[in-house]
Image (cartoon, rainbow, N blue to C red):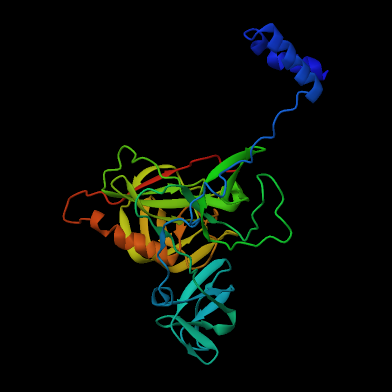
Amino acid sequence: MKRLVCAAVFAGILAIIPSGLAAAQRQVCETDSCTKPPAPPPGLTADQLPESLAPPVLSLGYDPQLLGDRMYQRIAGPAPVLASPGGEALREMPPGFTFVTTQGTEGDYTQVNPGEWISTSVLTPVWPSTFSGVLLDGPLDYSMGWLLRYVVPSAAPGAEPPADGQSLPRYETVSLFSYVIVDGWRWYQIGPDQWLHQTDVARIVPVPRPAGADSKRWVSVDLYEQVAIAYEGNEPVFATLVSSGMADWPTNEGLFHVYYRNPRAPMSGANAQPDFYDLEEVPWTMYFDDDIALHGAYWHDGFGFRRSHGCVNLSITDAHWIYQWAAPEFDTSVPENTGLAVFVYSSGIYR
Protein backbone atom coordinates (compact mmCIF):
# COMPACT_ATOMS: atom_id res chain seq x y z
CA MET A 1 0.00 0.00 0.00
CA LYS A 2 2.82 2.40 0.86
CA ARG A 3 4.55 1.65 -2.48
CA LEU A 4 1.35 2.57 -4.37
CA VAL A 5 1.08 5.88 -2.54
CA CYS A 6 4.74 6.54 -3.22
CA ALA A 7 4.35 5.82 -6.91
CA ALA A 8 1.48 8.27 -7.12
CA VAL A 9 3.48 10.98 -5.40
CA PHE A 10 6.41 10.66 -7.79
CA ALA A 11 4.49 9.93 -11.00
CA GLY A 12 4.95 13.43 -12.38
CA ILE A 13 8.65 13.45 -11.52
CA LEU A 14 9.38 10.06 -13.09
CA ALA A 15 8.13 11.35 -16.43
CA ILE A 16 10.97 13.88 -16.70
CA ILE A 17 14.00 12.25 -14.98
CA PRO A 18 16.36 9.58 -16.38
CA SER A 19 15.23 5.99 -15.89
CA GLY A 20 18.28 5.09 -13.78
CA LEU A 21 17.60 7.92 -11.38
CA ALA A 22 13.96 6.93 -11.28
CA ALA A 23 14.90 3.42 -10.25
CA ALA A 24 17.18 4.76 -7.55
CA GLN A 25 14.37 6.99 -6.31
CA ARG A 26 12.01 4.02 -6.11
CA GLN A 27 14.54 2.07 -4.06
CA VAL A 28 14.96 4.93 -1.58
CA CYS A 29 11.23 5.33 -1.35
CA GLU A 30 10.73 1.63 -0.67
CA THR A 31 13.50 1.59 1.92
CA ASP A 32 12.35 4.72 3.79
CA SER A 33 8.62 3.98 3.43
CA CYS A 34 8.09 7.34 1.69
CA THR A 35 8.71 9.30 4.90
CA LYS A 36 8.85 13.08 4.53
CA PRO A 37 10.99 15.47 6.54
CA PRO A 38 9.12 16.90 9.55
CA ALA A 39 7.29 20.14 8.92
CA PRO A 40 8.84 23.21 10.54
CA PRO A 41 6.97 24.56 13.55
CA PRO A 42 4.35 27.19 12.67
CA GLY A 43 4.82 30.88 13.27
CA LEU A 44 7.96 32.94 13.69
CA THR A 45 11.06 31.64 15.40
CA ALA A 46 12.61 33.40 18.38
CA ASP A 47 15.23 34.87 16.04
CA GLN A 48 12.56 36.23 13.71
CA LEU A 49 10.52 37.92 16.44
CA PRO A 50 11.25 41.54 17.38
CA GLU A 51 13.27 42.25 20.49
CA SER A 52 10.24 43.76 22.21
CA LEU A 53 7.09 41.65 22.02
CA ALA A 54 4.82 44.39 23.38
CA PRO A 55 2.85 46.51 20.87
CA PRO A 56 4.39 50.00 20.40
CA VAL A 57 1.31 51.84 21.69
CA LEU A 58 0.60 54.23 24.54
CA SER A 59 -2.22 53.54 26.99
CA LEU A 60 -4.42 56.49 27.91
CA GLY A 61 -4.35 55.43 31.54
CA TYR A 62 -7.10 56.68 33.80
CA ASP A 63 -7.73 59.83 35.80
CA PRO A 64 -9.03 59.08 39.32
CA GLN A 65 -10.76 62.47 39.42
CA LEU A 66 -12.59 61.75 36.15
CA LEU A 67 -13.77 58.35 37.38
CA GLY A 68 -14.58 59.58 40.87
CA ASP A 69 -16.47 62.80 40.15
CA ARG A 70 -19.76 61.00 40.87
CA MET A 71 -20.80 58.40 43.43
CA TYR A 72 -22.67 55.84 41.36
CA GLN A 73 -24.87 53.36 43.20
CA ARG A 74 -27.24 50.59 42.18
CA ILE A 75 -30.72 50.34 43.67
CA ALA A 76 -32.04 46.97 44.77
CA GLY A 77 -35.65 47.84 43.93
CA PRO A 78 -38.46 48.21 44.37
CA ALA A 79 -37.72 51.07 46.73
CA PRO A 80 -39.71 54.16 47.78
CA VAL A 81 -38.29 57.59 46.99
CA LEU A 82 -38.93 59.99 49.88
CA ALA A 83 -39.30 63.77 50.09
CA SER A 84 -36.94 63.86 53.09
CA PRO A 85 -35.04 61.36 55.25
CA GLY A 86 -37.80 59.11 56.63
CA GLY A 87 -40.44 61.44 55.13
CA GLU A 88 -43.35 61.20 52.70
CA ALA A 89 -43.08 58.77 49.78
CA LEU A 90 -43.04 60.58 46.43
CA ARG A 91 -42.84 57.58 44.13
CA GLU A 92 -41.38 54.10 43.95
CA MET A 93 -38.37 52.95 41.99
CA PRO A 94 -39.45 49.76 40.17
CA PRO A 95 -37.28 46.64 40.17
CA GLY A 96 -34.73 46.41 37.39
CA PHE A 97 -31.29 47.53 36.33
CA THR A 98 -31.40 50.88 38.12
CA PHE A 99 -28.53 53.23 39.00
CA VAL A 100 -28.41 56.67 40.60
CA THR A 101 -25.76 59.24 41.44
CA THR A 102 -25.91 60.03 45.13
CA GLN A 103 -25.28 63.34 46.86
CA GLY A 104 -24.61 62.59 50.52
CA THR A 105 -26.25 60.86 53.47
CA GLU A 106 -28.28 61.75 56.53
CA GLY A 107 -28.84 59.02 59.08
CA ASP A 108 -30.06 55.88 57.32
CA TYR A 109 -30.95 57.73 54.11
CA THR A 110 -29.08 58.86 50.99
CA GLN A 111 -29.96 61.80 48.79
CA VAL A 112 -30.34 60.78 45.14
CA ASN A 113 -31.67 64.06 43.71
CA PRO A 114 -32.65 67.47 45.11
CA GLY A 115 -35.61 66.77 47.39
CA GLU A 116 -35.38 62.99 46.88
CA TRP A 117 -34.06 60.47 49.39
CA ILE A 118 -33.86 56.72 49.53
CA SER A 119 -32.93 54.17 52.19
CA THR A 120 -29.18 53.56 52.19
CA SER A 121 -29.85 49.86 52.81
CA VAL A 122 -31.02 49.33 49.22
CA LEU A 123 -27.94 50.95 47.64
CA THR A 124 -24.73 49.29 46.48
CA PRO A 125 -21.75 51.48 45.44
CA VAL A 126 -20.38 50.95 41.92
CA TRP A 127 -16.77 51.63 40.95
CA PRO A 128 -16.19 52.42 37.26
CA SER A 129 -13.74 50.38 35.22
CA THR A 130 -10.17 51.64 35.03
CA PHE A 131 -9.71 50.14 31.56
CA SER A 132 -8.53 52.48 28.81
CA GLY A 133 -7.66 52.22 25.13
CA VAL A 134 -4.42 53.03 23.35
CA LEU A 135 -3.05 55.85 21.23
CA LEU A 136 -1.66 54.76 17.87
CA ASP A 137 1.36 56.48 16.34
CA GLY A 138 1.35 55.35 12.74
CA PRO A 139 0.89 51.86 11.24
CA LEU A 140 1.88 48.86 13.35
CA ASP A 141 4.36 46.32 12.02
CA TYR A 142 2.16 43.59 13.48
CA SER A 143 -1.49 43.44 14.38
CA MET A 144 -2.35 43.80 18.06
CA GLY A 145 -5.16 43.05 20.44
CA TRP A 146 -6.29 42.80 24.03
CA LEU A 147 -6.66 39.66 26.12
CA LEU A 148 -10.32 39.13 26.97
CA ARG A 149 -9.70 36.94 30.01
CA TYR A 150 -6.93 35.62 32.20
CA VAL A 151 -5.28 32.98 30.04
CA VAL A 152 -2.23 30.72 29.89
CA PRO A 153 -0.77 30.58 26.34
CA SER A 154 -0.38 27.19 24.66
CA ALA A 155 3.00 26.01 23.36
CA ALA A 156 1.52 25.17 19.94
CA PRO A 157 -1.68 25.98 18.02
CA GLY A 158 -4.56 23.82 19.23
CA ALA A 159 -2.64 22.47 22.22
CA GLU A 160 -3.79 22.57 25.82
CA PRO A 161 -2.03 25.21 27.90
CA PRO A 162 0.69 23.82 30.20
CA ALA A 163 -0.42 23.18 33.77
CA ASP A 164 2.51 25.20 35.11
CA GLY A 165 2.24 28.00 32.54
CA GLN A 166 2.19 31.65 33.54
CA SER A 167 -1.21 33.34 33.30
CA LEU A 168 -1.51 36.62 31.42
CA PRO A 169 -4.02 39.19 32.73
CA ARG A 170 -7.23 40.36 31.11
CA TYR A 171 -6.91 43.62 29.14
CA GLU A 172 -3.17 43.14 28.52
CA THR A 173 -2.14 44.28 25.04
CA VAL A 174 -0.34 41.73 22.87
CA SER A 175 1.21 41.70 19.40
CA LEU A 176 -0.23 39.12 17.00
CA PHE A 177 2.74 37.96 14.94
CA SER A 178 1.11 35.18 12.90
CA TYR A 179 -1.80 32.80 13.02
CA VAL A 180 -2.71 29.21 12.20
CA ILE A 181 -6.23 27.84 11.66
CA VAL A 182 -7.14 24.78 13.73
CA ASP A 183 -10.65 23.30 13.47
CA GLY A 184 -11.97 26.49 11.90
CA TRP A 185 -10.56 28.82 14.58
CA ARG A 186 -7.56 31.09 14.47
CA TRP A 187 -4.69 30.61 16.86
CA TYR A 188 -2.53 33.71 17.24
CA GLN A 189 1.17 33.69 18.02
CA ILE A 190 2.05 36.26 20.69
CA GLY A 191 5.62 35.14 21.41
CA PRO A 192 8.07 32.22 21.15
CA ASP A 193 6.00 29.04 21.63
CA GLN A 194 3.05 31.14 22.82
CA TRP A 195 -0.31 30.75 21.10
CA LEU A 196 -3.81 31.93 21.96
CA HIS A 197 -7.23 30.87 20.69
CA GLN A 198 -8.97 33.70 18.85
CA THR A 199 -11.78 33.84 21.42
CA ASP A 200 -9.19 34.93 24.00
CA VAL A 201 -8.22 37.99 21.96
CA ALA A 202 -9.94 41.08 20.55
CA ARG A 203 -7.80 42.50 17.76
CA ILE A 204 -7.58 45.82 15.97
CA VAL A 205 -8.75 45.57 12.34
CA PRO A 206 -8.49 49.02 10.67
CA VAL A 207 -10.76 49.62 7.68
CA PRO A 208 -10.60 52.04 4.75
CA ARG A 209 -12.67 55.19 5.08
CA PRO A 210 -16.17 54.28 3.84
CA ALA A 211 -17.94 56.33 1.20
CA GLY A 212 -20.05 58.97 2.91
CA ALA A 213 -17.78 59.39 5.91
CA ASP A 214 -17.45 63.11 5.23
CA SER A 215 -16.01 64.21 8.57
CA LYS A 216 -12.24 64.49 8.90
CA ARG A 217 -12.43 62.62 12.18
CA TRP A 218 -14.51 59.45 12.25
CA VAL A 219 -14.93 56.26 14.23
CA SER A 220 -15.32 52.63 13.20
CA VAL A 221 -17.01 50.04 15.43
CA ASP A 222 -16.22 46.39 14.69
CA LEU A 223 -19.05 44.29 16.13
CA TYR A 224 -17.12 41.05 15.63
CA GLU A 225 -13.97 42.05 17.47
CA GLN A 226 -15.82 44.49 19.78
CA VAL A 227 -13.24 47.18 18.99
CA ALA A 228 -13.68 50.87 18.15
CA ILE A 229 -11.02 52.80 16.21
CA ALA A 230 -10.77 56.59 15.90
CA TYR A 231 -9.33 57.98 12.64
CA GLU A 232 -8.01 61.30 11.49
CA GLY A 233 -8.33 61.19 7.73
CA ASN A 234 -7.19 57.70 6.83
CA GLU A 235 -4.90 57.18 9.83
CA PRO A 236 -6.05 55.34 12.95
CA VAL A 237 -5.03 57.34 16.03
CA PHE A 238 -6.82 55.54 18.87
CA ALA A 239 -8.36 52.13 19.53
CA THR A 240 -10.23 50.52 22.38
CA LEU A 241 -12.59 47.75 23.44
CA VAL A 242 -16.34 48.31 23.46
CA SER A 243 -19.52 46.47 24.42
CA SER A 244 -22.20 46.62 21.74
CA GLY A 245 -25.76 45.32 21.63
CA MET A 246 -26.69 41.76 22.49
CA ALA A 247 -28.51 39.45 20.06
CA ASP A 248 -31.98 40.63 21.12
CA TRP A 249 -30.96 44.31 20.94
CA PRO A 250 -28.41 44.49 18.12
CA THR A 251 -26.32 47.49 17.20
CA ASN A 252 -27.22 48.27 13.59
CA GLU A 253 -24.53 48.11 10.93
CA GLY A 254 -24.09 51.02 8.54
CA LEU A 255 -22.74 54.54 8.26
CA PHE A 256 -24.17 57.15 10.62
CA HIS A 257 -23.40 60.62 11.96
CA VAL A 258 -23.59 61.85 15.53
CA TYR A 259 -26.61 64.17 15.69
CA TYR A 260 -26.70 64.95 19.41
CA ARG A 261 -24.14 64.93 22.20
CA ASN A 262 -24.40 65.51 25.92
CA PRO A 263 -21.78 65.13 28.66
CA ARG A 264 -24.45 63.66 30.98
CA ALA A 265 -27.68 62.07 29.73
CA PRO A 266 -30.30 59.89 31.46
CA MET A 267 -31.24 56.62 29.78
CA SER A 268 -34.12 54.26 30.45
CA GLY A 269 -36.09 51.64 28.61
CA ALA A 270 -38.07 48.39 28.62
CA ASN A 271 -40.65 49.82 31.04
CA ALA A 272 -42.62 47.20 33.01
CA GLN A 273 -40.49 44.44 31.47
CA PRO A 274 -38.01 42.10 33.17
CA ASP A 275 -35.09 43.90 31.51
CA PHE A 276 -36.18 47.38 32.63
CA TYR A 277 -33.28 49.76 33.07
CA ASP A 278 -32.93 53.30 34.38
CA LEU A 279 -29.51 54.97 34.36
CA GLU A 280 -28.84 58.44 35.70
CA GLU A 281 -26.21 60.68 34.18
CA VAL A 282 -24.76 58.38 31.52
CA PRO A 283 -21.44 60.12 30.76
CA TRP A 284 -20.06 61.44 27.46
CA THR A 285 -23.00 60.43 25.28
CA MET A 286 -23.09 60.83 21.48
CA TYR A 287 -26.25 59.64 19.68
CA PHE A 288 -25.73 58.46 16.10
CA ASP A 289 -28.55 56.01 15.20
CA ASP A 290 -31.93 57.03 16.61
CA ASP A 291 -31.63 56.10 20.31
CA ILE A 292 -28.29 54.27 19.90
CA ALA A 293 -25.23 56.12 21.17
CA LEU A 294 -21.56 55.94 21.95
CA HIS A 295 -21.26 56.53 25.70
CA GLY A 296 -19.38 55.77 28.86
CA ALA A 297 -20.56 52.88 31.04
CA TYR A 298 -19.88 53.02 34.78
CA TRP A 299 -21.96 49.94 35.64
CA HIS A 300 -19.80 47.16 34.17
CA ASP A 301 -16.26 46.10 33.32
CA GLY A 302 -17.11 43.71 30.51
CA PHE A 303 -15.53 45.57 27.59
CA GLY A 304 -14.73 43.29 24.68
CA PHE A 305 -18.05 41.41 25.01
CA ARG A 306 -21.56 42.25 23.78
CA ARG A 307 -23.81 43.28 26.68
CA SER A 308 -25.86 46.40 25.87
CA HIS A 309 -29.39 47.21 24.66
CA GLY A 310 -27.90 48.45 21.38
CA CYS A 311 -25.64 51.30 22.44
CA VAL A 312 -21.86 51.13 22.12
CA ASN A 313 -20.50 51.11 25.68
CA LEU A 314 -17.00 52.43 26.39
CA SER A 315 -15.10 52.92 29.61
CA ILE A 316 -15.55 56.39 31.08
CA THR A 317 -11.92 57.21 30.22
CA ASP A 318 -12.35 56.22 26.57
CA ALA A 319 -15.78 57.84 26.17
CA HIS A 320 -14.40 61.10 27.56
CA TRP A 321 -11.41 60.98 25.18
CA ILE A 322 -13.56 60.37 22.09
CA TYR A 323 -16.11 63.00 23.19
CA GLN A 324 -13.41 65.67 23.50
CA TRP A 325 -11.48 64.54 20.41
CA ALA A 326 -14.65 64.66 18.26
CA ALA A 327 -15.60 68.22 19.33
CA PRO A 328 -14.15 69.93 16.18
CA GLU A 329 -16.60 67.97 14.03
CA PHE A 330 -19.58 69.83 15.53
CA ASP A 331 -20.24 73.34 14.23
CA THR A 332 -23.64 74.64 15.28
CA SER A 333 -23.15 77.77 13.12
CA VAL A 334 -23.45 75.65 9.96
CA PRO A 335 -27.06 74.79 9.01
CA GLU A 336 -27.73 71.03 8.92
CA ASN A 337 -24.14 70.34 9.86
CA THR A 338 -23.46 66.62 10.25
CA GLY A 339 -21.29 65.57 13.14
CA LEU A 340 -18.76 62.80 13.62
CA ALA A 341 -19.17 59.90 11.17
CA VAL A 342 -19.63 56.48 12.81
CA PHE A 343 -19.15 53.36 10.68
CA VAL A 344 -20.52 50.18 12.25
CA TYR A 345 -19.54 46.91 10.61
CA SER A 346 -18.48 43.35 11.36
CA SER A 347 -15.14 41.88 10.32
CA GLY A 348 -16.36 38.33 10.89
CA ILE A 349 -19.34 36.15 11.78
CA TYR A 350 -20.06 36.26 15.51
CA ARG A 351 -20.36 32.74 16.95
Across and down, in percent, residue 19 comes to: 69, 7
Query: Closest to the observer: 76 or 303?
Result: 303
Across and down, in percent, residue 229 comes to: 40, 51
**136 above or below 78?**
above
Q: Residue at x 72, y 14 (%)?
A: 8
**254 above or below 300?**
above
Q: Quadrant of residue 136?
A: bottom left
Q: Looking at the rendering, in which quadrant would you find the C terminus?
A: top right
Across and down, in percent, residue 241 comes to: 48, 56
Q: Residue at x 72, y 61 (%)?
A: 164
**83 above or below 91?**
below
Query: Closest to the observer: 265 or 236?
Result: 236
* Residue 321 falls left or right of residue 21: left
Across and down, in percent, residue 142 comes to: 46, 47
Residue located farthest toward the bottom when viewing the structure as drawn: 107
Task: Report the number of numbered marks.
Answer: 0
Q: Looking at the rendering, in which quadrant would you find the N terminus?
A: top right
Residue located farthest toward the left when viewing the structure as drawn: 333
* Residue 121 falls left or right of residue 216: right
Residue located farthest toward the right when viewing the structure as drawn: 1
Residue located farthest toward the front when viewing the structure as drawn: 20
